[in-house]
Image (tube, rainbow, N blue to C red):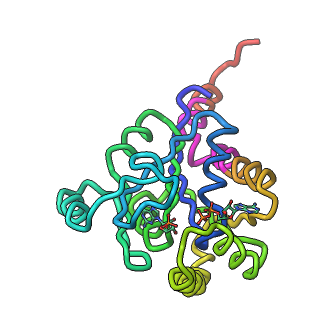
């Protein structure tokens, strides 16, 4: 639709729930999404490329970004900094694009405070055992880091009610469709269609409506 407002979508979820996999499928399957690339101080995993999955940097470089207000939010997660670059998000929203941030819960709540219209979606596995299997099966973290991430998951579970929606990533393709459906439905909220509503009211108000 012309003049459609872009939505800022925040996707969070337990480490290993499949957020990265889900985001990749979503942008492959549907046009128009702008996926924000975060900055982080964690070391790249095998197969990750600087500027594609993350902007990888030192703590010093990251702290410089914080001081310059170049990040719209940042948080520490299991010993590393993660943050969302401001420029990309603001530019894509101004273009009317739907912008997706795949970030953890502290960041999600900071975004909601700054952008009250943001749509918050939480991704989970069907059960905890599957989360454990996926984290181990990914083979990218040591047992020690997996334990830290599972501890963190227990804390994150306390905040799920702060999200607008929860999606269960059991079958990937079903989950991609559900997530896209939630975003598509959000575009139909009256608060996101104020211009249309005003126009329609103006046309109807006290006028002879031509046949
Ligand atoms: P996150 O980004 O949430 O930490 P990933 O996208 O890295 O999670 O997924 C964790 C692991 O689970 C990966 O090995 C991925 O291939 C696998 N995975 C993701 N979604 C599914 C799914 N629906 N069914 C089975 N395995 C999945
Ligand atoms: P991972 O190391 O598995 O890629 O990410 C660890 C956690 O950091 C995930 O929960 C992920 O959503 C979160 N994360 C990634 N980028 C950002 C960001 O820019 N800000 C915040 N607050 N969290 C992020």
Is residue 193 placed above or below 148 in the rendered structure? above
Q: Which residues are magenta?
A: 183-199
Image: 96 above or below 19: above
Give the mark count.
0
- Residue 131, given in percent of the width and then of the height, sits at 70, 75
On whether residue 45 falls in the magenta region, the answer is: no
Quadrant assignment for the C terminus: top right
> Percent from the top left, x then y, of residue 47?
52, 53
Kindly report the secondary structure that dominates the magenta region of the rendered protein: helix
Q: In the drawing, does residue 107 fall left or right of residue 200?
A: left
Query: Which residue is painted at 56% across and 86% down in the image?
Result: 147
Image vertical order of residue 7 relative to residue 121, above or below = above
- Residue 185 lies in magenta, yes or no? yes
Q: Is residue 157 left or right of residue 106?
A: right
Residue 199 x, y percent position in the rendering: 57, 29
| Among the 4 quarters of the image, the one containing residue 187 | top right
Q: Is residue 72 left or right of residue 190?
A: left
To which quarter of the image does residue 126 belong? bottom right
Displayed-image quarter of ligand 1: bottom right
Residue at the image point whose x is 53% and y is 29% from the top: 3
Camera-nearest residue between 13 and 147 = 147
């Amino acid at each position: 639709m012309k003049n459609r407002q872009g939505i800022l979508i925040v996707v969070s979820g337990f480490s290993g729930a499949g957020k990265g996999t889900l985001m990749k499928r979503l942008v492959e399957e549907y046009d128009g999404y702008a996926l924000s690339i975060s900055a982080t101080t964690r070391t790249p995993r095998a197969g990750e490329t600087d500027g594609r999955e993350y902007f990888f940097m030192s703590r010093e470089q990251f702290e410089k970004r914080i001081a310059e207000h170049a990040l719209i939010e940042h948080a520490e997660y299991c010993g590393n900094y993660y943050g969302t670059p401001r420029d990309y998000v603001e530019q894509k929203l101004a273009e009317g694009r739907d912008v997706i941030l795949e970030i953890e819960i502290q960041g999600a709540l900071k975004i909601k405070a700054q952008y009250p219209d943001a749509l918050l979606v939480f991704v989970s596995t069907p059960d905890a055992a599957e989360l454990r299997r996926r984290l181990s099966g990914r083979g990218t973290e040591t047992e020690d880091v997996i334990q830290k991430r599972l501890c963190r998951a227990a804390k994150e579970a306390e905040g799920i009610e702060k999200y607008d929606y929860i999606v269960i990533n059991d079958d990937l393709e079903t989950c991609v469709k559900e997530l896209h459906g939630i975003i598509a439905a959000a575009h139909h909220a009256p608060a996101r269609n104020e211009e249309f509503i005003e126009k329609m009211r103006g046309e109807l108000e006290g006028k002879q409506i031509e046949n």
